[in-house]
Image: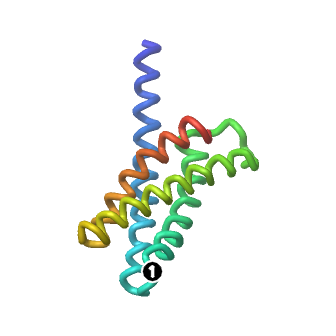
Amino acid sequence: MGRLLRVFAKIKRYSIYLIIGIITNIISLYLFILCFEFLSLPSLNSQYISSSVATFINFLLNKFYTFKSSKSTINIKIIFKYLIGWIISFIIIRLIFSFFYYKANLDSTFSYLLALFTSSIFFFNWQKKIVF
């Protein structure tokens, strides 16, 4: 019975993370499209704006809902670890987007979605194992 409860707890955590990830990735995608396609900002600037906003929202939601960090305050170590993961994730997005958009000539939205999906897998593991 205890093992079954642990399995359900893991499923619940992954489900919450998935929902939060979908929400923040949609925010990131729409902000990227707004900045890149409609405001004609360079892709790097568009990525920075969209990623920064979505990551901030993602941090707060995951801290309090997915990983339920035992600390009620946000300390500098947690922020630093999270920012390191964000920088790595940003680089992953940049490399994947650049490859698919500039080299493979795919649509910017599809290229960004591929990059978001890949970086989300990395970032979940980073948050789970390093940050929270």
Q: Foreground residue, 87 or 33? A: 87
Q: Residue type at mark 1? A: Pro
Residue 68 occupies quadrant: top right
| Position in image of residue 40 (x %, y %) | 41, 86
- Tell me where residue 72 appears, x and y as whole percent: 72, 43
Q: How is the image coloured?
A: rainbow
| Residue at the limit of the structure toward the bottom, as seen here | 39
Residue 39 at x, y percent in the picture: 43, 87
Report the quarter where the N terminus lies.
top left
Extreme residue in the top direction:
1
Image height of 106 relative to 90, above or below: below
- Tell me if residue 107 comes above or below residue 59 in the rendering: below
Question: In the image, what residue occupies the spot 29% across and 64% down?
Answer: 100
- The residue where tag 1 is placed is 42
Q: Residue at x 47, y 73 (%)?
A: 44
Quadrant in which the C terminus is drawn: top right
Q: Toward the viewer: 98 or 11?
A: 98
Disc 1 residue crowd, few under 14, some 14–19, many 20+, Cα 10 Å = few
Along the viewing direction, whichever of 132 and 91 lies nearer the viewer: 91
Horizontally, residue 128 falls left or right of residue 95, namely right
Q: Secondary structure at mark 1?
A: loop
Query: Would you place residue 78 above or below residue 52 in this image?
Result: above
Residue 118 in the image: state x and y as whole percent: 37, 51
Residue at position x 24%, y 71% from top?
A: 105
On screen, residue 52 versus residue 41, left or right, reads: right
How many numbered discs, if any?
1
What residue sits 45% from the left and 45% below the top?
122
In the visual, does 30 lie left or right of 86? left
